[in-house]
Image (cartoon, helix red, strand yellow):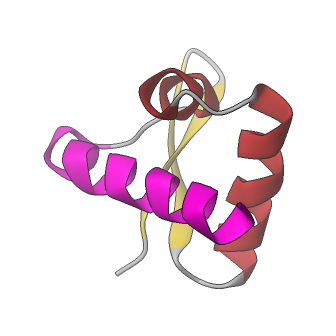
Amino acid sequence: MSEEAKQKILDFLKGVSGKGVATQADIKKGTGLDRKLVMKLIRELEQEGKIVGAGKSAGVGGYKLAG
């Protein structure tokens, strides 16, 4: 499940890459995954170097694909 959920997040971020960054809330809404799972997987994907934290809007950080 975890790898499938990670891929869902990566696919979602590919879809928003032209628009900038996506917040955790955007990712949760766009993937339908649980908030706690999204938070956990974002940390894992950052550690794996697949996504990076990027930008801030109203004090909320966003994420985008690495590279």
Is 27 placed above or below 37 here? above
Q: Nearer the viewer, residue 15 or 53?
A: 15
Is 40 placed above or below 2 here? above
Quarter assignment of residue 30: top left
Is 36 placed above or below 54 here? above
Q: Is residue 59 rendered to the left or right of residue 14? A: right
Q: Which residues, given as a range, are shown in magenta?
A: 1-20
**In the orientation shown, which residue stands out farthest toward the top?**
58
Residue 43 percent location from the top left of the image: 78, 61
- Examine the structure image and report whether residue 33 is included in the region drawn in magenta: no
Residue 33 percent location from the top left of the image: 64, 33
Residue at left offset 71%, top offset 61%: 1
Please indicate, yes or no, whether residue 64 appears anywhere in the rendered image: no
- Examine the structure image and report whether residue 4 is included in the region drawn in magenta: yes
Residue 19 percent location from the top left of the image: 19, 38
Q: Nearer the viewer, residue 19 or 1?
A: 1
